[in-house]
Image: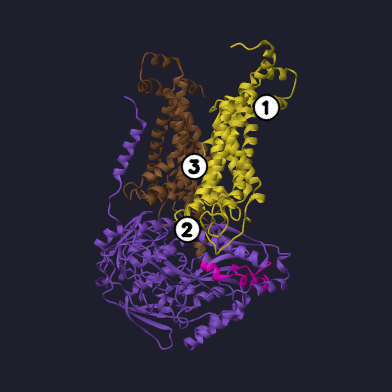
Chain colours: A yellow, B brown, C purple
Amino acid sequence: MSSPTHHLAEEDIEASSLWRDARLRLQKNHLAVVGAVALVIVILAVSLAPWIAPYEYDAQDLNLGATAPSAAHWFGTDIFGRDLLTQILYGGRISLAVGFIATAVALIIGVSWGSVAGYCGGRIDAVMMRFVDVLYALPFMIFIILLMVVFGRNMILLFLAIGAVEWLTMARIMRTQVQSLKQKEFVEAATSTGLSPLVILYRHIIPNAVGPMIVYTTLTIPSVMLLEAFLSFLGLGIQPPATSWGLLISYGAETMEEYPWLLIFPGAALTLTLFSLNFLGDGLRDALDVRGSKD
Amino acid sequence: MLKFILLRMAQAIPVVLAVITVTFFLVRAAPGGPFDSEKAVLPEVKKALEAQYKLDVPLTDQYLGYLADLADGDLGPSFKYPGRSVNEILASGLPVTAELGVYALCFALFIGVLAGILAALRPNTKQDYVPMTLAMIGICMPSFLLGPILILVFGIYLEWLPISGWGDLPGDKILPSITLGSAYAAYIARLSRAGMLEILSQDYIRTARAKGASDSRVVFKHALRGGLIPVIAFLGPAFAGLLAGSFVVETIFQIPGLGRFYVQAAFNRDYTMILGTTVFLSVLIVIFNLISDVLAAWMDPRLRTQFSKAK
Amino acid sequence: MRISYSSTLVALLALTLSACGGGEKNVVSGNATGYLHYGNGAEPQGIDPHLVTGVPESHIVRALFEGLAVKNPITLEPEPGVAERWEISPDGTVYTFFINPQAKWSNGEPVTASDYVWSWERALHPETGSLYAYMLFPVVNAEKFASGAIDDFAEVGIKSLDAQTLRISLNAPTPYFLQLMDHYSTFAVHPETVLKFGGMSDRFTLWTRPENIVSNGAFTLKEWSLNRQIKVEKNPHYWDKSSVALEGVYFYPTENVVSEERMFRSEQLHVTQGIPLGKIPNYRAVQNSPYVQAPYLGTYYYLINTKKPPVDDVRVRKALSYAIDRDTLTRTVLRDTAIPAYSITPPDTLGYNPPKLFSFDPEQARALLAEAGYPDGQGWPGLEITYNTNEDHRKIAVAVQQMWKDELGIDVSITNQEWKVYLNTVSQGEFQVARRGWIGDYVDANNFLDLFLANGGNNNTGYANAEFDDIILNQAPKAASREERYQLFFQAETMMMQEMPIIPFYTYTSKRLIHPSVNGIYPNLMDSLNLKYVRLDPNQRLDLTTE
């Protein structure tokens, strides 16, 4: 295809930008766009919960009890007469917070670990990755359950425990990325100018590995949220008076015959949010043309 | 290949040892002992109980004693179900969980591979979008959401299938297996689609198609072996995930398997049961990872050379 | 050949669906063959009468073993069991039991008095570790033997005068002693069988396995599949076997009330252990409702740690108690399945009625709180309710949290802990307010009031009053008449509730579903099950149409 010569120069420069390419590809992926939009709506809704929630979070009305969705309560009420929409908004804050924070923990540890291992190579790399392999083999669910049972349930521990499980894959991916980037010329150039390895790592290599990082972050958040919901379902995650979608689902499952809305709405909230995150992550992966790799 | 297997087995031993040690001290560190009861326990009685279960010796001695018993294959008596050894309880729960896992995996493989292949054959058409969206639903809907919904629809409204137990009523294995397997069906669908797409774009496939080979011939004769490699490699981690998933599924469907025993044991501070189950499951996971890696290597000649170079 | 995705799936589905459906319902087959299918709650920890403590265990133990005296299922008055009659000395301290010569073990051997002597030594021996050893403490020197103060069991007040005659000496007249004989912890076990598999006080040996066990009750143990079912069958050597209509019973571990109710609905169970609260209104509306609710000898309350601020102030404790609307709570959250309680002893405990010193009084509550230094909740340092993980406890805690907020303006947090952790927390006193329930072991106010003795192991509140102790330990046992005894109890309980070391909530009720084909399960205050009297009518089916 030919293009008018007077546009050539600009297009040359523009087209070589990874991000612009990616953004265009992403925009073409309808599912991913829908996912992104839905995600933004959800995040906005739960962040603004204290202002937009129709009722007080803990406003009980024992005489009302559980009622089906109505004009007064769009999503119905639970057995204490508390508005379900409000519960879902506030629960979403916790679920998403756990998702983001635990993923952030995993990200920080995983990226640092993987990039150091990948950059150093040799002995250090072998030892560090052996450690990752060993941890990979452990039945983590069992340990998390034990941890939560032993040390009681507090949120910090929850974040750490979940983050501690997810960083492994991040580390592996980072290592592969760094390994391949290390060979590139700009790194050789940086090294020859005498920059310290740490600076090279943080200023040159990691920013270039951001692509896969973004993708896996977006894909880790939903699996973290699932993990939190799973723990809450077993009674080991979030504790009342706080609530999360996982907890709401576990309550709803118990009374799903009498009050199906208590299961359906929180379930839909969780599923839709996970959907959005996954579609977005998939779209990002396709757009940035990232390949998954095991080691 | 043999060297590779032996090497991995040797690597597994410190892993299992670490698991035992960490679990042991973690469980002992927990507040609440196995003999706390609602009725106040006379101090003499408590002493007698602790002596019987060897809880009155220093922690390190307990640990060594446990290791010694372990070497004999003795996982000790359960604290919660005295009179039954952990071995016995594991033996009663294992076949159930194993069967559940196998059925779930079969379901996942069958549906997943089929869906993935179909999607890969006609990428970016309805034949691709529909299975892949269903797959996404499978991933995003946790088992403790899917399970109750299936129970509601098939067990209660339609009354087609039983909703609890395992092997007591005909058909009671269907819903739990589907619930457990659906997330994995979804992953496998995506993996096999990706793997198949990669293979199908290869030259030798295009040649076969150009020669007029039908879809099924192309798939079965040429593409399947290579395209399924990512699926095989996934089986190892899938196994660990299936075990974890069984905790929830067994709870929802009241299935007397290992998963439910484990969760109960954790809540009951049944020290020996927790330890025994953890050890057992860790060993299983390690073995399964090994088998999965070996299978993947065997199926893909490219990986074989990579593994033989492992130090 | 094109792979047809949809047709394969349809074929698979058809195949699997054809495998299901069919199979007779348990209730139908049970009625035809005389087998009861009983939802028993948690999987039993064991069935050794001297070692178990839970309700699910007790059902099976009571099916397999029998005591010297049993309780009439409706009136709860003592009736002959292993003993065909007994004599009580005029001063009430010596009991002589005459064992029925027809009373036999399941291997045909007769039950002898020496079996009881041996069994009680086992039950009291400190190494056996029976948590119910205290049930036998009314017997002379029993407590000393159990604590290891004396070694020789011959000094304990139980003697076999001959093969059929048993003499028991008590420390003091104990009006409820015959009731204790119906408690499984005092049952006899077959010495030779136990000794075949270990020492007298070896815990949980193999003697209770179906192939080994020897018992003396209406049924014998046929099968025990862990976490699946326990099967007992009619005992041909039982002395009263002609009264037993059932051929056998299947006990199922139904820990989850929701799936238990579903099993009942699909006629897989004759009887359930409980019922999800949300289902009760529907069942109540059914004609010939299978829902059976009856008073149960137990109280649900919150322990208050009187040593920890802010609840070390009696005014605060009273304020908390007065501010709870028990009527609304029992009506809404508990769906009228409980009776509001204002004291520790349940009403009409064999004719004894506890004092009621207060009622729902938010005005007074606020006044007391202000007096204690927290007017309208200002300056309130916070309070935590601890409860063991359970849906119903959570519901009540959440409701109470809100009530205290609305009526008193104070912030209270709630925390749940696993059973074991919670028990530890309570016994260590690491709580401010903790949920508690106490089910009576025998029908007498004494076993509720003696919880609050100063060094009572189950006190946990820090309440200690020498006068209270004196009444319970000294005066009441020596009372000349039941009226006098009850008056003393009333006095003691009034004294105690004036200090409000607990916040009583409600008196329990037993609630379960019973299939219309079942006759002979009589709800009673002890909710004690006596399967001997159960009969099945095959003509009755479950009809859940509502009125």
Q: Is residue C49 left or right of residue A216?
A: left
**SS at mark 1 in the image:** helix
Disc 2 residue type?
Answer: Gln
Q: Mark 3 lies on which chain?
A: B
Q: Position of residue A159 (x, y in %)?
A: 61, 44
Q: Which of marks 1 and 2 is in front?
A: 1
Q: Quadrant of residue B22?
A: top right
Q: Which chain carries label 1?
A: A
Q: Do the residues labelled 1 and 2 touch (CB within 8 Å)?
A: no
Do callouts 1 and 2 point to residues on the same chain?
no
Q: What residue type is labelled 3?
A: Met
Magenta span contains residue C120: no
Residue labelled with disc 3: B141
Residue assigned mark 1 = A207
> Which mark is first along the chain, 3 or 2?
2
Q: Residue A174 carries which label?
A: none
Which quarter of the figure is the C terminus of chain A placed in?
top right
Q: Which numbered mark, 2 or 3, is in the foreground of this view? A: 3
Q: Distance between the residues labelled 3 and 1?
A: 34 Å
* Farthest right residue in view: A194
Question: Which residue is pictured at 29% across the width and 44% down the height?
Answer: C19
The quarter of the displayed image where residue C203 is located:
bottom left
Q: Residues within 10 Å of mark 1 (few under 14, many from 20)?
A: few
Q: Is B53 or A56 nearer to us in this picture?
A: A56
What range of the chain is rendered magenta?
C303-331
The residue to which callout 2 is attached is B52
